[in-house]
Image (cartoon, rainbow, N blue to C red):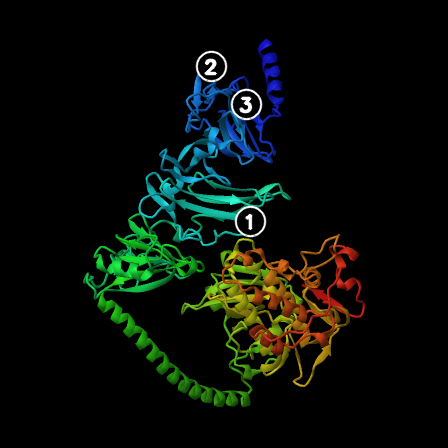
């Protein structure tokens, strides 16, 4: 009974865990199990903890708002077995952890001396998550004796360095836990590989597991999205005293951490205060191409082009048998040996993650031409590239051994020049020449064949029509009002589409809307397609389907998505489009990470392409077409980031001589509809002009049309843009990332804002037509002053869930 009472009292004492109000301890103080230090701003806390269901006790540092997120552990290898641990700082400035027998089970060192004698050592937990021991003045960096940032665990925090202090010999790197319940050092580590040109790597033991590349002046070659921006700063320093990498969060509202988990996968998380949880942002080893040397030597890995591994031009598989069995680890070898003289040359390979630089040589001061000449003189030199890609490129980087771990990137890749024998270079030139000739010849033959086939098909079609038959259109297609056999739209059967999408597998699903779902597919010939599958329960979707089949089959323009065919069979209704590798525009401009991949040149090209596509619809196509639902999610981007307008389910045709029309069925997306359409059902080509203006302002600002509306200002993006314009502060509207972009021309950006405001004016008569818009965007002629835009303040008046259906009784509003 006494033992039970003692245990009961002890459990109560443990439950009454307290926190000191201090962020520091001195030799006269200590931290016992149940007590914690809290940083001055409350962001981090330090104390004793047990991971998961483990009964072992450790001293660690964790986030104040998430006590389960431990970022540093002191006694990783020597856990306490009970709740009697004590943490102290000695008079010599050394942190010690004592167990119940007063035995030291862990201690820090003095990594930097503050003179011959230590007078007043103090340990302090900073708001950065760094635990420091100083002597005397706590704010003077010269008094630093020791810091936890020099001995990381599994987490990399803002301002924490990974790399070497070449003066002291200190090597900083993060190491994984053994498991979620054991913080002892696991088999994975992450840091800088110092051999050759330093590069960021994840090691498994003493071997590279994942290689994130070398620094090229802006980012690591395997992490093109890690570029300086208004929210984060990334820095790589290499001089005679130190070599390190660190990142710094510039906005205190962001709470980030990067952790190397026990499986060796690096993950970047952002704290979401609304949900009180961590949101995964980036991850290493997200696909097989990020596995180190997955394709072996002299091969490239392209995750978007099956099979993912391919020998570089001029190279063949080292073991054809294993290569054909998808075992690519053996890599490739030269088809023709090098002459090792000035007859050799170089073939350029663009947009790649540069190969392993652990056996490379570099010089910061050489030009690319000097680099080429030096490589050509050295028989062991296999390739060369710019060391720094900024300002057109500078410096020289040479590879002196086999080229390993080359990855083809969609964006942000770098150019490398790979050495080849003269015969390979000649074959390359001849291939390009032959290909050019073949293309011309094939086009001529194809044209003749098409003419002959077209004539034969026309004759056969007439014959079948007389006999009451229709080869192209089965009975299912005849149910579509407006179907025209002269459209010659290819018809796919259900089996073909099912096989192409692996029976509509979930991992092939690209997106979903009110009409149904969109899937990625690959036809037998290797052509990639996007399949828009109508939901069987969607009546609105069927109307869109009919409209899209009838309209888009007749449209051909480089800035309109191409309809390849359709399928109506066994209650299935599907549209087959060309596949767009980079999905929709909204996935870039409204994403904080991906938006940084869109520099001003890309955005300006996208704006111009959308404008030309609308001009074709309004004036150059056989029918005058009003899209009625132009928005960022309906602009798709191909592999070269060229824009293509999609989703013609809501489009409407008007006569060639008509200027406007009326409709009782108002459809479209709230925020992009002009007032005369939303309020009275009046549509015209100026309806699309208004939507284009909203989209243009979204592209320039990176903001959604509705997200700026709040209870104080009651302004959406248009109202915000107008206020900045009349206050002569339009520059404040520009996406902060574009301000830092070297390709950004302020005159062009401000002119785009000006054009956008002209397009969204209240009266449709005041808005320019698309031919004028295209001219405005491509010239520097003076522009008229815009008038107040047609924007609304519904959020303040009617609440967040406002629907125009509640206020417009004469129409049926279907906002999407």
Q: CA distance from mark 2 to mark 1?
A: 47 Å
Question: Dot 2 surroundings within 10 Å: few (below 14), some, or many (20 or more)?
Answer: few
Residue closest to the eye, 702 or 311:
702
Indicate the quadrant where residue 762 lies.
bottom right
Secondary structure type for disc 3: strand
Q: Which mark is residue 682?
A: none
Residue closest to the eye, 153 or 731:
731
Q: CA distance from mark 1 to mark 3?
A: 34 Å
Query: Furthest residue to the top?
Result: 2
Secondary structure type for disc 2: loop
Q: Earlier in the sequence, mark 2 or mark 1?
A: 2
Residue closest to the eye, 411 or 724:
724
Secondary structure type for disc 1: loop
Indicate the quadrant where residue 633 lies.
bottom right
Residue at image point 76% right, 60% down:
793
Give x and y (percent) for residue 364: 34, 52
Residue at image point 59% right, 12% down:
6
Q: Which mark is residue 231?
A: 1
Q: Earlier in the sequence, mark 1 or mark 3?
A: 3
Residue on which disc 3 sits: 25
Indicate the quadrant where residue 368 lies.
bottom left
The reply, left or right, for residue 119 in relation to residue 634 is left
Position of residue 694 relative to residue 121, above or below, is below
Q: Which mark is residue 102?
A: 2
Tag nearer the camera, 2 or 1: 1
Give x and y (percent) for residue 468: 56, 86
Residue 406 visible within the image: yes
Give x and y (percent) for residue 414: 39, 59
Q: Quadrant of the N terminus?
A: top right
């Amino acid at each position: 009974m006494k033992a039970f009472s003692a245990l009961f009292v002890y459990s109560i004492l443990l439950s009454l865990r307290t926190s000191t109000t201090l962020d520091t301890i001195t030799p006269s103080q200590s931290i016992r199990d149940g007590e914690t230090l809290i940083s001055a701003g409350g962001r981090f806390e330090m104390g004793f903890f047990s991971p998961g269901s483990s009964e072992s006790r450790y001293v660690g540092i964790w986030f104040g708002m998430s006590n389960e997120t431990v970022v540093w552990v002191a006694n990783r290898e020597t856990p306490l077995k009970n709740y009697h641990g004590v943490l102290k700082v000695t008079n010599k400035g050394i942190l010690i952890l004592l167990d119940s027998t007063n035995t030291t089970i862990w201690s820090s060192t003095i990594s930097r001396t503050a003179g011959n004698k230590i007078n007043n050592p103090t340990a302090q937990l900073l708001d950065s998550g760094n635990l420091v021991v100083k002597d005397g003045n706590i704010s003077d960096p010269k008094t630093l004796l020791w810091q936890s940032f020099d001995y990381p665990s599994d987490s990399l925090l803002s301002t924490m360095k990974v790399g070497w202090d070449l003066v002291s010999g200190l090597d900083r790197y993060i190491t994984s836990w053994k498991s979620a319940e054991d913080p002892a050092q696991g088999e994975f580590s992450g840091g800088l590989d110092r051999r050759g040109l330093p590069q960021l790597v994840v090691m498994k033991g003493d071997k590279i597991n994942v290689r994130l590349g070398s620094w090229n002046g802006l980012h690591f070659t395997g992490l093109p999205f890690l570029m300086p921006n208004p929210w984060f700063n990334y820095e790589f320093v290499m001089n005679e005293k130190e070599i390190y990498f660190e990142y710094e969060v510039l906005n205190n509202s962001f709470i980030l951490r990067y952790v190397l988990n026990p499986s060796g996968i690096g993950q970047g998380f952002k704290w979401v205060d609304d949900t009180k949880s961590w949101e995964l942002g980036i991850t290493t080893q997200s696909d097989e191409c990020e596995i180190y040397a997955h394709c072996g030597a002299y091969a490239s890995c392209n995750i978007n082009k099956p099979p993912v591994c391919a020998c570089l031009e001029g190279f063949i598989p080292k073991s054809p048998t294993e290569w054909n069995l998808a075992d690519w680890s053996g890599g490739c070898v030269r088809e023709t040996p090098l002459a090792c003289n000035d007859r050799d040359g170089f073939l350029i390979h663009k947009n790649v993650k540069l190969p392993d630089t652990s056996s490379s040589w570099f010089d910061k001061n050489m030009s690319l031409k000097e680099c080429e000449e030096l490589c050509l003189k050295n028989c062991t030199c296999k390739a060369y590239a710019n060391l720094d890609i900024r300002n057109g490129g500078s410096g020289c980087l040479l590879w002196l051994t086999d080229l390993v771990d080359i990855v083809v990137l969609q964006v942000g890749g770098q150019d490398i020049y790979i050495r080849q024998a003269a015969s390979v270079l000649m074959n390359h030139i001849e291939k390009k020449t032959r290909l050019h000739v073949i293309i011309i010849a094939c086009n001529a033959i194809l044209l003749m064949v098409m003419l002959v086939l077209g004539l034969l098909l026309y004759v056969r079609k007439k014959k079948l029509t007389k006999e009451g038959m229709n080869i192209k259109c089965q009975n299912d297609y005849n149910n579509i009002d407006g179907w025209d056999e002269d459209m010659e739209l290819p018809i796919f059967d259900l089996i073909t589409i099912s096989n192409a999408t692996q029976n509509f597998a979930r991992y092939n699903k690209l997106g979903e809307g009110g009409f149904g779902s969109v899937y990625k597919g690959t036809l037998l010939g290797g052509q990639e397609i996007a399949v828009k599958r109508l939901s069987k329960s969607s009546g609105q979707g069927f109307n869109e389907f009919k409209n899209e089949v009838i309209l888009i089959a007749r449209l051909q323009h480089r800035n309109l998505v191409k309809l390849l065919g359709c399928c109506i069979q066994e209650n299935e209704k599907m549209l087959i489009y060309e596949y767009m590798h980079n999905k929709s525009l909204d996935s870039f401009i409204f994403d904080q990470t991906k938006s940084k991949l869109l520099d001003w040149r890309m955005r300006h090209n996208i704006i111009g392409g959308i404008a030309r596509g609308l001009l074709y619809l309004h004036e150059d196509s056989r029918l005058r077409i009003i899209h009625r639902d132009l928005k960022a999610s309906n602009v798709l981007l191909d592999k070269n980031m060229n824009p293509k307008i999609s989703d013609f389910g809501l489009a409407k045709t008007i006569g060639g001589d008509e200027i406007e029309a009326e409709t009782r069925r108002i459809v479209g997306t709230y925020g992009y509809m002009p007032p005369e359409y939303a309020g009275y059902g009046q549509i015209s080509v100026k309806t699309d002009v208004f939507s284009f203006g909203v989209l243009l302002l979204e592209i320039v600002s990176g903001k959604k049309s509705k997200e700026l509306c709040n209870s104080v200002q009651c302004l959406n993006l248009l109202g915000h843009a107008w206020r900045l314009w009349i206050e002569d502060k339009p520059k404040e509207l520009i996406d902060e990332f574009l301000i830092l972009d070297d390709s950004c021309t302020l005159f062009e950006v401000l002119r785009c804002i000006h054009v956008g405001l002209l397009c969204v004016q209240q009266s449709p008569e005041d808005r320019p037509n698309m031919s004028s818009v295209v001219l405005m965007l491509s010239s520097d002629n003076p522009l008229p002053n815009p008038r107040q835009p047609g924007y609304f303040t519904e959020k303040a008046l009617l609440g967040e869930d406002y629907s125009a259906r509640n206020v417009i009784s004469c129409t049926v509003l279907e906002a999407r």
